[in-house]
Amino acid sequence: RHLRELLIYFFNLKKSAAEAHRLLVEACGEAALSERSCREWFQKFKNGEFDVEDKERSGRPKVYKDAKLEALLNEDSCQTQKELALTF
C-alpha cells in the first residue's frame, strides 16, 4: 500500500509512470513495483480511482505468525526478503 501511495505522489507531481518506476527502484530496489504495475496504477489515477487499499481476493488470506516480522514489514515495506532474513 505504501508504494501505491508513493505512486499517487509521483502522479500528482506530473511524473510519468516510467519515471515513477525508476524512482521506486532507486528507493526500494527489488521490492519496487514493476513498470507495468506502475502504468496500470497511473491509468487508474487518470480515471479518478485513487483507492490504494488491497481488494478482497478469494483464497486464504496472508497470516504472519511472527509479530516481529509483521512489525518490520509495517515499518518499511520496501525491505527485500534478503534484508528481512538478515534481521533474524
Image: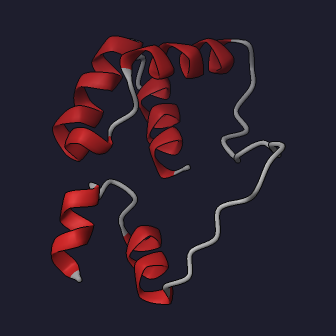
Compared to 9, does 74 lie above or below?
A: below
Residue 35 in the image, given as x and y percentages of width and height: 37, 17
Of 71 and 43, which appears nearest the observer?
A: 71
Of 9 and 37, which appears nearest the observer?
A: 37
Task: Give residue 64's quadrant in the image.
Answer: bottom right
Compared to 18, does 29 lie above or below?
A: below
Residue 6 in the image, given as x and y percentages of width and height: 44, 41
- Residue at the extreme bottom: 67
Asked if residue 79 lies left or right of residue 46, the reply is left
The residue at 29%/35% (across/down) is: 24
The residue at 56%/49% (across/down) is: 1
Asked if residue 51 lies left or right of residue 80, the reply is right
Asked if residue 8 lies left or right of residue 54, the reply is left
The residue at 78%/42% (across/down) is: 55
Task: Give residue 32's quadrant in the image.
Answer: top left
Of 9 and 42, which appears nearest the observer?
A: 42
Of 14 and 45, which appears nearest the observer?
A: 45
Counting the numbered discs, the total is: 0
- Residue at the extreme front: 60
Residue 58 in the image, given as x and y percentages of width and height: 84, 43
Looking at the rendering, in which quadrant would you find the C terminus? Answer: bottom left
The residue at 73%/59% (across/down) is: 61
Residue 15 in the image, given as x and y percentages of width and height: 37, 17
Coloured how?
secondary structure
